[in-house]
Image (cartoon, rainbow, N blue to C red):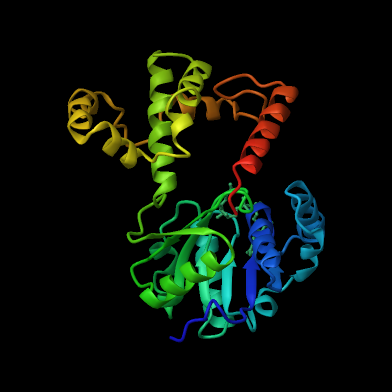
Amino acid sequence: MAVPDPTSDQTIAVIGGGLMGAGIAQIFAVAGYDVTVFEPNDEVRASLHDRTRSNLAIIGEDENAAERITLVADMAEAVASATYVTEAAPERLELKRSIFADLVEQAPRDCILASNTSVIPITRIAEGLATAERIVGTHWWNPPYLIPLVEVVQAEKTSGAVIAATMALLKSIGKSPAHVKKDTPGFVANRLQHALWREAIAMVAEGVCDAKTLDDCVKNSFGLRLPVLGPLENADMVGLDLTLDIHKTMMPELDRHDRPNELLSGLVDAGVLGFKTGEGFQKWTPEQMDETRKRLLQHLTAARVT
Ligand SMILES: NC(=O)c1ccc[n+]([C@@H]2O[C@H](COP(=O)([O-])OP(=O)(O)OC[C@H]3O[C@@H](n4cnc5c(N)ncnc54)[C@H](O)[C@@H]3O)[C@@H](O)[C@H]2O)c1
């Protein structure tokens, strides 16, 4: 298939105008593209321009960029002349498969079809669909206008040309795309993140320390290095011989359950859901939740590179 030239005009469409879809549309709009968003929920659709203006105000960018986003209630209309589509609908495999089956029919033959799934392998979404070579994963991070990474996931049938065009397009709008060559659940960053969370939950369950102490240990130690030093750079810096000696002691001790920890499933079964209910691994007052959200936004804004 012919793939869009990222340096020429693109016609961008986004499927789903919730948290991520709106943020992704915002990035393309700020980069100067006209973007059409298909959002089936009337209220969500009606709120998108205000949400985008508010996000742009927070990061000190021109709020008028929101006007480049057109909202529609019909998916075929959104993608009729698209060259690049990003799907950001709810994280359910059957829903995404049905959306991609429609996209294959409704979007022009050369249009790239990208999914923003958090963890579902793209190969499962594209299975059995025609023109699967143009279906690719693009895993953006929340909020998309503050976090640079987009993982570009190569599914079994995704063509090299589609990967190259997607990487180039994302780079041209200021993102930091990373080519994920194997379509593994969670891709790279969520797989790493949840390996850490699995161990964190296991340690609290074992009584090694309480949840707040565990989070303080991360924030006051290797968490401080992470923006500068990735884990493998860190291993190189301390020496692979030392890393090997440490792993000989540590590896037999690490959690190796192949299902969610019972501490986590027990809390969820008891209706203890975190910020949503005011209690998770810790108790949260409304003020503490607001303060935590504010500190995160300030930190990400200060660290912003795009
Ligand atoms: N929230 C995050 O931090 C985050 C980060 C990265 C990736 N993701 C992924 O992005 C996707 C969207 O997540 P979100 O957080 O924006 O969810 P969201 O609930 O905020 O938005 C999803 C939107 O899709 C709409 N929708 C429902 N059915 C649809 C359909 N058939 N076609 C098109 N739109 C439909 C909903 O009305 C809703 O507005 C999910 O796959 C999620 O896993 C989320």
Whether residue 241 is situated above or below residue 159 in the rendered picture: above
Q: Is residue 270 left or right of residue 31?
A: left
Name the quadrant of the N terminus.
bottom left
Name the foreground residue: 214 vs 16. 214
Q: Residue at x 56, y 76 (%)?
A: 103
Whether residue 182 is situated above or below residue 277 in the rendered picture: below
Task: Check the image and name the residue furthest to the front.
Answer: 237
Name the quadrant of the C terminus.
bottom right
Q: Which residue is drawn at 49% across and 70% down?
A: 168
Please tell me how many numbered marks the rendered image carries: 0
Q: Position of residue 172 (x, y in %)?
A: 55, 68
Whether residue 161 is situated above or below residue 58 in the rendered picture: below
Q: In this view, does 99 lie to the left or right of 226?
A: right
Q: Image quadrant of residue 240?
A: top left
Q: Position of residue 3 (x, y in %)?
A: 48, 82
Q: Image quadrant of residue 250?
A: top left
Q: Image quadrant of residue 14?
A: bottom right
Q: Which residue is drawn at 66% across and 78% down?
A: 76
Name the foreground residue: 29 vs 236. 236
**Within the displayed image, which quadrant is ligand 1 positioned in?**
bottom right
Q: Where is residue 10 in the image (x, y as percent from the top left)?
A: 61, 78
Residue 98 at least partly seen: no
Residue 54 at least partly seen: yes
Q: Position of residue 110 (x, y in %)?
A: 51, 84
Q: Is residue 148 left or right of residue 248?
A: right
